[in-house]
Amino acid sequence: MDYVESLLEEYFDASKFAEMETYPQNKELLESLLAIEEEICWEFNVPPTLKFRDLFRLIPMGITKEEYIQTSIQNLSREKTRYYYQPNKTVFETFKAA
């Protein structure tokens, strides 16, 4: 979990830097943000889709780095559980005739 927290810290700092950047089309900065997003998703064992990237991509104004990290980890953990949760089929459904 420490690695994910360090990735989220790095993402937070890079995002704040991108907001202040006078040239938002800085290709290297955008590529590094996308690489960090992908790495965070892989560390949480979820696909790096827009659904999961949006859980930590949008940083609200006035939020501290610690709050951002805590909230992002909670959101990712909750959505990971939803992603992998599949209720077991009943015995009747398993052996139902075609």
Image: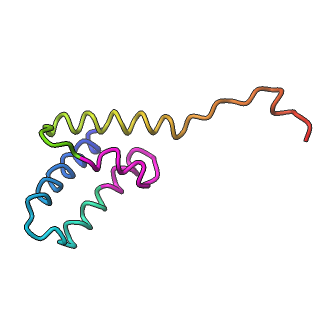
Magenta includes 43? yes
Quarter of the rendering containing residue 31: bottom left
* Rendered location of residue 20, percent (x, y): 8, 59
User: In the rendered view of the protein, which quadrant contains the C terminus?
Assistant: top right
Magenta: predominant secondary structure element? helix
Q: Residue at x 30, y 45 (%)?
A: 56
User: In the rendered view of the protein, which quadrant contains the N terminus?
Assistant: top left
Q: Which region shows up in magenta?
A: 37-58
* Rendered location of residue 16, percent (x, y): 13, 53
- 23 horizontally vs 59: left or right: left
Quarter of the rendering containing residue 67: top left
Magenta includes 48? yes
Count all numbered tags in the image, as a single digit.
0
Q: Residue at x 35, y 49 (%)?
A: 54
Decide: is 9 above or below 71: below
Q: Residue at x 61, y 35 (%)?
A: 86
Decide: is 74 above or below 18: above
Q: Residue at x 46, y 39 (%)?
A: 80
